[in-house]
């Protein structure tokens, strides 16, 4: 059974940083593409960043976080990480870790296993 547990959220001021972690279990973490998504009140959930398989998987970012956020993975400990720098109030959201339901694919809004989310709040 796939389990994803996010942690590391909190409240920071504009320009601050947070590091999110997602502890995973129930599958071969290193063999799966992984993503972070986020959802703000009244908005649809949106993809933030994706990382491919392997110890240095290819990364892909949404335009609104490029240059500020870094996704990485610790395959030895089955942990997905999102380092968030230069945060702004627009980054306020619940952040979700996502794993694909189909091996060989990446998580999508329509097909993913989800964690419970962790709240990130950025004040001005």
Image (spheres, rainbow, N blue to C red):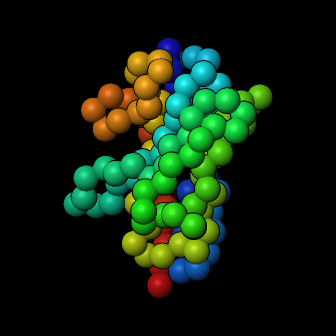
Is 109 situated left or right of 68 in this image?
A: left
42 or 68: nearer the eye?
68
Is 71 situated left or right of 123 in this image?
A: right
Q: Where is residue 74 in the image (x, y as percent from the top left)?
A: 72, 36
Which residue is the extreme one toward the right? 76
Is 9 situated left or right of 39 in this image?
A: right
Q: Where is residue 8 in the image (x, y as percent from the top left)?
A: 61, 53
Q: Which residue is drawn at 47% across and 84% down?
A: 124
Q: Where is residue 18 in the image (x, y as percent from the top left)?
A: 62, 63
Q: Residue at x 27, y 32 (%)?
A: 110
Which residue is the extreme one toward the bottom? 124
Q: Residue at x 50, y 43 (%)?
A: 50
Q: Can residue 6 be seen in this view?
A: no
Which residue is the extreme one toward the front? 58
Q: Residue at x 72, y 33 (%)?
A: 55
* Figure quadrant of residue 68: bottom right
92 or 11: nearer the eye?
92
Work out whether 34 lies above or below 28. Answer: below
User: How many numbered markers are drawn?
Assistant: 0
Work out whether 17 lies above or below 81. Answer: below
9 or 33: nearer the eye?
33
Q: Can residue 43 be seen in this view?
A: yes
Q: Position of residue 69 (x, y in %)?
A: 57, 61
């Amino acid at each position: 059974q796939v389990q994803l547990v996010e942690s590391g959220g909190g409240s920071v001021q504009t320009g601050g940083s947070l590091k999110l972690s997602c502890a995973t279990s129930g599958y071969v973490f290193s063999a799966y593409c992984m993503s972070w998504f986020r959802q703000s009140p009244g908005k649809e959930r949106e993809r933030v960043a994706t990382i491919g398989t392997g110890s240095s998987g290819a990364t892909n970012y949404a335009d609104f976080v490029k240059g500020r956020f870094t996704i990485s993975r610790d395959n030895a400990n089955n942990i997905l990480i999102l380092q968030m720098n230069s945060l702004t109030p627009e980054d306020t959201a619940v952040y979700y870790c996502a794993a694909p339901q189909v091996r060989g694919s990446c998580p999508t809004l329509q097909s993913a296993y989800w964690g419970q989310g962790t709240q990130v709040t950025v004040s001005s």
